[in-house]
Each structure stands twice: as structure tokens, then as C-alpha cells.
Amino acid sequence: MMNEFQNDKVRKVNKSVARKLFREGVDVYVLPCKVRYDNPRIQPYLLQRTDTFDRIVSEYEYYNCNAEVGYYCSYYVEKGDK
């Protein structure tokens, strides 16, 4: 299925869970929604704690999301984290 995601390193979470974990200090990675996590051409982006979660995600979506790779982000956290 297209929406299923299985990986030994990370798990996919929704935006509200990603926001909560980001505030708790957990590393959150983002990718455009049509890009697989293990894609060799487009690497996951680790959200830096330079601003609020929503502002960082909005800026990432503005510059990196489009019709080809998807208009919104998918969020990933390492499996060992919460």
C-alpha cells in the first residue's frame, strides 16, 4: 500500500505528534509527502531548533514542496525515541 511505511530505523508520525516530540527535544525529520524515506536523491531534513516548529515546517514546505514531490511534509522520528 502507498501509505504504509516500514523501516528498521525510523517511524512515521503525524504532525501533532511530531510537534509534541519536537518540543520535548526529540529529533524530527521531514520529507515531502511523495518521497520515500530511503530515497537516494532527496535526503530527510532534520528540523533545527532555531524557531518554532510551525514556522520551520512552513518554510520547508514553501521551498521544498511542489507538485512533483508533494505539497506537504511527512514526519519521521527514530524508533528508539518515544
Image (cartoon, grey):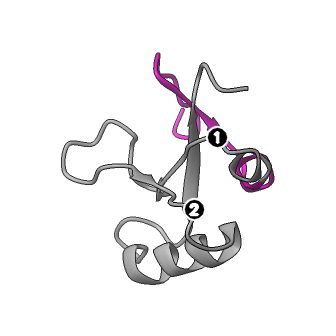
Q: Check if residue 46 falls in the magenta segment.
A: no
Q: Position of residue 59 (x, y in %)?
A: 51, 80
The kind of secondary structure element at disc 2 is loop
Q: Which quadrant does the N terminus fall into? A: top right
Amino acid type, mark 2: Arg
Looking at this view, is 24 or 45 the one in front?
24
Looking at this view, is 73 or 58 the one in front?
58
Which of the 4 quarters of the picture holds residue 31?
Answer: bottom left
Residue indicated by mark 2: 49
Vertical order, 47 against 71 (above or below) = above
Vertical order, 37 against 51 (above or below) = above
Q: Which quadrant does the C terminus fall into? A: top right
Identify which residue is drawn at 51% across, 23% down: 6
Identify which residue is drawn at 34% across, 70% down: 68
Identify which residue is drawn at 55% across, 70% down: 50
Vertical order, 16 against 5 (above or below) = below
Q: Check if residue 4 falls in the magenta segment.
A: yes
Q: Position of residue 17 (x, y in %)?
A: 78, 46
For marks 2 and 1, the one nearer the N-term is 1
Residue indicated by mark 1: 26
Q: Position of residue 70 (x, y in %)?
A: 46, 67
Vertical order, 69 against 62 (above or below) = above
* Crowd around label 1: few <14 · some 14–19 · many ≥20 (10 Å): some
Amino acid type, mark 1: Val
- Using residue 20 as the reference point, say whether residue 10 is left or right of it: left
Looking at this view, is 25 or 55 the one in front?
25
Task: Identify the magenta region.
Answer: 1-19
